[in-house]
Amino acid sequence: MLLRLSLFVISSALLVDAANARAQTLDSIARIAIANNLAVRRTHEREREADADVRRARGMFLPSIGVDARYSEMSGVVNIGDFINPAYATLNQLTGTHNFPTNVNATLPLQQETRLRTTQPVFNAALFANLDAARSTRTLRGAERAAAIRRLDATSRISYLDWARASRAVDIWNATIPVLAENARVSQCLVDAGSSTPDVVLRARADVADAEQQRAEAARVRDAALGALNLLLDRAPSEPVASVADSALPVAPTITFADALAASAQREERAMAGAAIDGARAAGRAASSAFLPSVAVAVDYGVQGNGYHFDRDHDVAVASVVLQWNLFNGGQDAARRESANAAREDANIQRADVDRQIALDVRTTWDAVQVARSAVESARARLDAARAAFKLVDRRYVEGLASHLDWSDARARLTAAELNEVVTRYTLAARGVDLERAAALRPIPKN
């Protein structure tokens, strides 16, 4: 009993280790692609830009403080003293005193004006709409970035599986060609011994040539898949990648269509559509806010005059309440509000269309997984039958009871079955990755 329990624990640990190795291999590919992809990096910068816009929109509610300073050299401007000094001189003559100054020097505008201005919004409905619009844009940019990461995560893993599948096809042809070459050698020996006719050798050589051609084509597909994968990883086209064993292929998720459709509610495209609707609503509120007044408080403190004198006799303080209310501008505000309402309806229609597209995507990928899973079972049965049939034909061929044509046909069927079995297994793994993307079954990798 203890031995059985120990064996069970060891086997479970081995299965867990294999699953972890499988996940680490594909996850590392996805992480490298996400970290190096230029499109993902652009979405990250757009998200940063939107986050900065939110902070700027919040800052509009806070008071603004600034310094305004002006110093002017003037010529030909009006001097009030030119009008006052003669009148004061006349008054001094009439009164016989010097009580009235006759050296008044006051130009307009004043030669310098320096002030510290503080402005605080009290009521402005457009500020709230602007903040909501900035937040919706930030949500939109974040969802766009997450959607790009999810797509790249699936694309990079599928690209890796395409390369691994092509590599396995090359391995099969590499194992097949020596068998066919040995058969051609044996056939030549039989012809030389007079036990067979020359057409057997010709058929064997044709089989070898065909296998070499197929192997060259498989190698081309493998190298092209490697180049496409390295392009996603931002590496040299021919840089090698670590291989994964057939037993470590990712397992396609086993889930009902209803559960997959429910899980797809987490798709980032839905959040993008919701953010577009929120942005349209905020634009509508911004347009409606034009019909309301805005109130702000402004406080100025500084000095002004024809020179700089920093004392209580020359300082100036002004406190103002500013009211702005646009009563009529030719119907522009009403047109803006109507445009925002149309944009909101368009966003609602777009969200309904996105829901339909996601549902179709989930249906298509889920069906593909079911078909691929049944194809794997059929491919395994075909491979077992082809392998058993080739053993029988090969034994009969060695004993001289089967023709070379029968042997060649059985060998071709076995090779085709091996290739088909590899293709179906890797196709199932790729379809499973695609279903994870469509139904949002896999958490977004962190880059």
Image: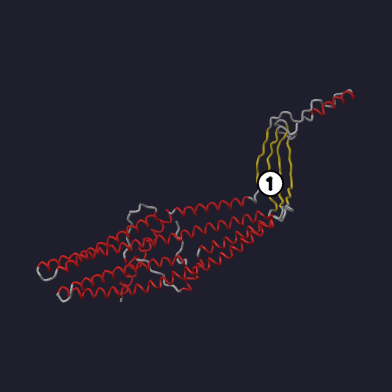
Q: Is residue 383 left or right of residue 360?
A: left
Q: Return the residue nearer the eye: 428 or 10.
A: 428
Determine the image quadrant of residue 445.
bottom left
The relative height of residue 225 versus residue 398 in the rendered view (above or below) is: above
The N terminus appears in which quarter of the rendering? bottom left
Residue at 10% x, 69% y is 194
Q: Return the residue nearer the eye: 320 or 172.
A: 172
- Residue assigned mark 1: 119
Determine the image quadrant of residue 2.
bottom left
Estimate the x, y position of residue 423 in percent, counting from the top left. Answer: 33, 67
Estimate the x, y position of residue 272 in percent, counting from the top left. Answer: 54, 61
Estimate the x, y position of residue 278 in percent, counting from the top left. Answer: 60, 61
Q: Return the residue nearer the eye: 131 or 212.
A: 212
Amino acid type, callout 1:
Thr
Q: Residue furthest left?
A: 193
Estimate the x, y position of residue 18 in percent, counting from the top left. Answer: 34, 65
